[in-house]
Amino acid sequence: MELNKLENLVEIALSKPKKKIAVAASEDEQVLLALKQATDIGIVEPILVGNLSKTKDLANQIGFDIEKYEFIEESNPAKSARIAVQMVREGKAQIIMKGLVNTADYLRAILDKEIGLRTGNLLSHIGVFEIPAYHKLIGLTDAAQNIAPNLEEKVSIVQNSVDLLRRLGIENPKVALLAAVENVNPKMQATIDAALITMMNRRGQIKNCIIDGPLAFDNAVSKEAAEHKGIVSPVAGDADLLVAPEIETGNALYKSFTYFAGGVVAAIILGAMVPIVLTSRADTEKSKLMSIALAASF
């Protein structure tokens, strides 16, 4: 299956059982707007945890009737995150979403060794972008979670993302491991890691995807650029997933896709017991909605 637009994520989510989404610190207008749209479409049912009076006031302003949904009163944002985590651990919610709570407090609750949502897998961030200049949706990992992943961590990041793309119907995702050059350079660790991971894929150690790297960004997304450099690869110019060598590259690409390339993104964190929706206040309303849809596609 080829995904061409973010609305495809809504179609996939609608084909799955409706998920319950626990929202930590629900007194956030932008989050409530996205939740209203998601509930109107029918892809999620919220469990709201937060300040009741503030949430009600905001919900009334946007015409969102929250009376029919479960609400847990907790005015302390950090404690609301812990309650949202508890809802997931008890099986009452299948998605967790950040509201008006500090990111550090939100992740601290999720990563808590006793009450958190760890599974033993590495947590990693993925953004799925709709970019006018590209012929299909494209994923980018990791722009927000892992700072300088080593080889083992990069393998986990790839596997997390491949598992997600397969859930979305891409049976054999094409994965481009990014670096500054296409050849292995002993002085550039990114090229060494990319070559090793590519060989692991070819030897069957990483399955259900086609991996190639190192690839410079232009060769990953442009067949013409790859042909000009004599690169013959099923991934070049047709990547489903871009894997950044470290967070600076990933973060810069992520923001350039949004601010320069007119991209819209759906983003979640993978590797926990359930999908983690961690949107930025700078994200658009559509981006927040599509992030919910991506999480509901599991």
Image (tube, rainbow, N blue to C red):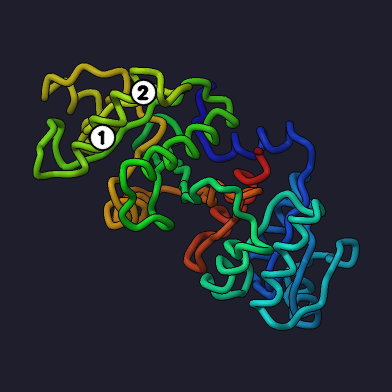
Residue at horizontal 37%, vertical 30%? 175
Left or right: residue 67 compared with residue 124: right
Q: Is residue 84 left or right of residue 214?
A: right
Q: Is residue 117 visible?
A: yes
Q: Which residue is mark 2?
A: 201
Give the amino acid type for the residue marked by disc 1 in the picture: Ala
Q: Badge 2: few (under 14), some or many (20 or more) residues near its Cα, within 10 Å?
A: some
Residue 158: which quarter of the image? top left
Residue 9 lies, in percent from the top left, at 60, 38
| SS at circle 2 | helix
SS at badge 1: helix
Where residue 211 sits: x, y (%)? 34, 26
Q: Quadrant of the C terminus?
A: top right
Crowdedness near tag 1: few (<14), some (14–19) or many (≥20) residues, C-alpha within 10 Å: many
Residue that extends furthest to the front in the rendered view of this protein: 114
The three-letter code of the residue at mark 2 reads Asn
Identify whether 133 is placed above or below 262. Answer: above
* Side of 136 relative to 117 (left or right): left
Residue tagged by mark 1? 194
Residue 52's x, y, as percent? 80, 79
Q: Which mark identifies residue 263?
A: none
The numbered mark, 2 or 1, whose residue comes first in the sequence reads 1
**Image quarter of residue 138:** top left
Q: x, y percentage for residue 231?
A: 17, 21
Q: CA distance from mark 2 to mark 1?
A: 11 Å
Answer left or right for 94 relative to 198. Answer: right
Residue 208 lies, with reference to residue 40, above or below; the image says: above
Residue 290 visible, this orientation: no
Q: Residue at x 76, y 46 (%)?
A: 19
Residue lying at 58% horizontally and 25% vertically, measured from the top left: 169
